[in-house]
Amino acid sequence: MSKLPHITTSIFSVMSKMAAEYNAINLSQGFPNFPVDERLTEIVSKLAFENVHQYTPMTGYPPLMNQIAKLVQTSYNRIIEPETEVLVTAGATQGIFASIQALVKSGDEVIILDPSYDCYEAPVLLSNAKPVRVALNDDYTPNWETIEKACSSKSKMIIINNPHNPTGKILTENDFLQLEKILSKFPNLLVLSDEVYEFITFEEKHISAHTKEFLLNRCIMISSFGKSFHITGWKIGYVVAPEYLMKEIKKVHQFLVFSVNSISQVAISQYLDVVDVNLLGKFYQGKRDYFQKLIQNSRFELKPCEGTYFQVVSYANISKNDDVTFCKKLITDHSVAAIPISTFYSDHKDQKLIRFCFAKDNHTLESAAEKLRKI
Ligand code: PMP
Ligand code: GLN
């Protein structure tokens, strides 16, 4: 009866709801709790009185599409054609959904790496295609050998997420070399590169799919202004893809949303003139370091975090409970909400790991850490 029998309510909804019910500090779902840049709020308040409240063109507000092309050029030295290679979407989620629906056919296979963010599988299943889950190595690097073994003539797409949610891992030059080798053996394989945290990396520089010549003609690149500008609730992102793929993605997009809400598109197009995305990495590195310092003497064990605004920790020294039970008790007994990592695995592999979001003001991080240190 159900088209998606195995899909349940997203863990992010479940944990945020529970956090609200128990008045817990919510470090579960990934969203910032500090005010957005005043320059952006000023732009929005002025725009409210201007003539910006009707449909934009289906593919996006043209000045924003130009700004996205400019951002890609200044960040990665890649020249793209705004009219044919850019699509503004209602968040990365909608860009991913439209891309998969448009490009993946019944019977195709899509490689999804385990653990992975939760929004890839449903659109694959709704395309009547098969998600093929391939485990990352224990250190969360891709295992290119097993990925290659999982590829066949049926493989239509491989989804990579770099920087990676939930583990904070980023891909290296060698990873791209391995990917290139696989793509040369499977000429029909496309890559969907989810780079919503592209500007949030720390010691190491982010290597974008945009910078890889071998990917340009077969990669769908996804980003989100929600992450880059601390405005997750605006639900605005974009897709960059070569024209022959974008033509298909647009066909789905026009019947999914037609166009994305106008005022946020105009606002972001103006904000992109003044904001410097290169400051984001340092900003979140400060948050990561502060949060790590606050809980380093607790019984939680910190895992490496190279990018994103998520910190994975082990609670193996604290409890034998599975991670979902542990997270629920963390809310009810200690008033802090986190995300159990097992929910990012197709087989719900419990490794006593949970994820905290550190995109919070310092007071919130301090209050949470005080509670965590007592456990
Ligand atoms: N991909 C990843 C890896 C994410 O973490 C998220 C969520 N924040 C999204 C996609 C969805 O982004 P958006 O809120 O712009 O739809
Ligand atoms: N990407 C966010 C996270 O990982 C959640 C977004 C959502 O709730 N859909 O926490």
Image (tube, rainbow, N blue to C red):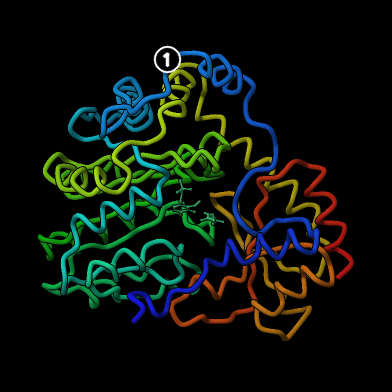
Q: Position of residue 333 (x, y in %)?
A: 84, 72
- Three-letter code, disc 1: Asn
Q: Position of residue 71 (x, y in %)?
A: 37, 27
In the depicted structure, whether residue 86 falls above or below residue 256: above
Q: Is mark 1 within 8 Å of ligand 1?
A: no
In the depicted structure, whether residue 262 falls above or below residue 239: above
Q: From the image, which quarter does the N terminus lie in?
A: bottom left
Corner quadrant of residue 23? bottom right
Q: Nearer the viewer, residue 58 or 72?
A: 58
Residue pointed to by mark 1: 51
Q: Position of residue 154 (x, y in %)?
A: 14, 73
Q: Position of residue 128 (x, y in %)?
A: 22, 72
Q: Residue at x 50, y 58 (%)?
A: 165
Q: From the image, which quarter does the C terminus lie in?
A: bottom right
The extreme bottom residue here reads 320
| Classed neighbour count for the residue bearing mark 1: other residues with Cα under 10 Å, few (<14), some (14–19), many (≥20) | few
Q: Residue at x 42, y 19 (%)?
A: 52
Q: Nearer the viewer, residue 304 or 241?
A: 241
Q: Residue at x 19, y 62 (%)?
A: 104
Q: Residue at x 69, y 56 (%)?
A: 27
In the image, 330: left or right of 43? right
In the image, 192: left or right of 204? left
